[in-house]
Amino acid sequence: MQAKSGAKEKEKEKGGATNKNSFLTDITEIRRRARQHIEDGAVTDTYKGDRHVVLRVLNEALATEIVCVLRYKRHHYMAKGIHSQAVAEEFLEHAAEEQEHADLIAERINQLDGEPNFNPDGLLTRSHSEYVEGESLVDMIREDLIAERIAVESYSEIVRYLSDNDPTSRRLMESILAKEEEHAEDMKSLLETITREEMFEERNKAS
């Protein structure tokens, strides 16, 4: 029995040494691969995503953010009426945040050895949301709310697509998604407030 026990202990020790050596070999291999294809930057052999698809999806998100910046900027400068000052400030704040999103997405595209597409040709085709100017202040708020809802839905799909294949891009899009949800709630509250106040003013005029 002692001989068998001793043999098992030696096998365990041998196995432990083999596992340890195997792990060290993996580290060595990782270091070797890191030195190869160094021009690929953040894209290593362990990257699981379809890089071409991810870059296309991220460039669509980039176009969406650029269109949102342009629309919010337009609405900021064109907001008129008794309630326009506070709403215009909200538009400007959202424009700045959408610009930050665009910069972050462009930076991630660059990290993936891609090219952020800022070409105005085809911008609206690449964008998920539309560029609608709106005539009245209520129209502008409504169009921005619609655009934010589109972004929330499409970005949610992007997050699900990226999953564990590209956790860095997924976390980026999750953070942007959270902000777009906040924007949607802001626009919803503004729309309710302005609509309620305009109805109240109309009743006062009628009386």
Image (tube, rainbow, N blue to C red):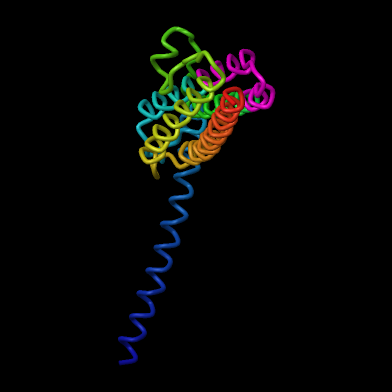
Closer to us: 201 or 24: 201
Residue 80's quadrant in the figure?
Answer: top right
Seen at 43% across and 66% down, the residue is 17
Residue 125's quadrant in the figure?
Answer: top left
- In the rendered image, is residue 34 in sight? no
Against 160, residue 147 (above or below) is above
Residue 207 is left or right of residue 26, and the answer is right
Q: Is residue 181 magenta?
A: no
Where's residue 142, x and y in %?
A: 49, 25
Which quadrant of the rendered structure holds the N terminus?
Answer: bottom left
Q: Is residue 89 magenta?
A: yes
Seen at 37% across and 25% down, the residue is 52
Closer to us: 202 or 97: 202
Residue at the outermost top position: 121
Closer to us: 161 or 46: 161
Where's residue 33, x and y in %?
A: 45, 38
Closer to us: 90 or 24: 90
Seen at 65% across and 24% down, the residue is 83
Residue at the outermost bottom position: 1
Where's residue 56, x and y in %?
A: 39, 23
Residue 78's quadrant in the figure?
Answer: top right
- In the rendered image, is residue 137 in sight? yes
Which quadrant of the rendered structure holds the C terminus?
Answer: top right
Magenta segment boundaries in residue numbering: 66-91
Where's residue 114, x and y in %?
A: 46, 22
Instruction: Give the overall secondary structure of the magenta segment.
Output: helix
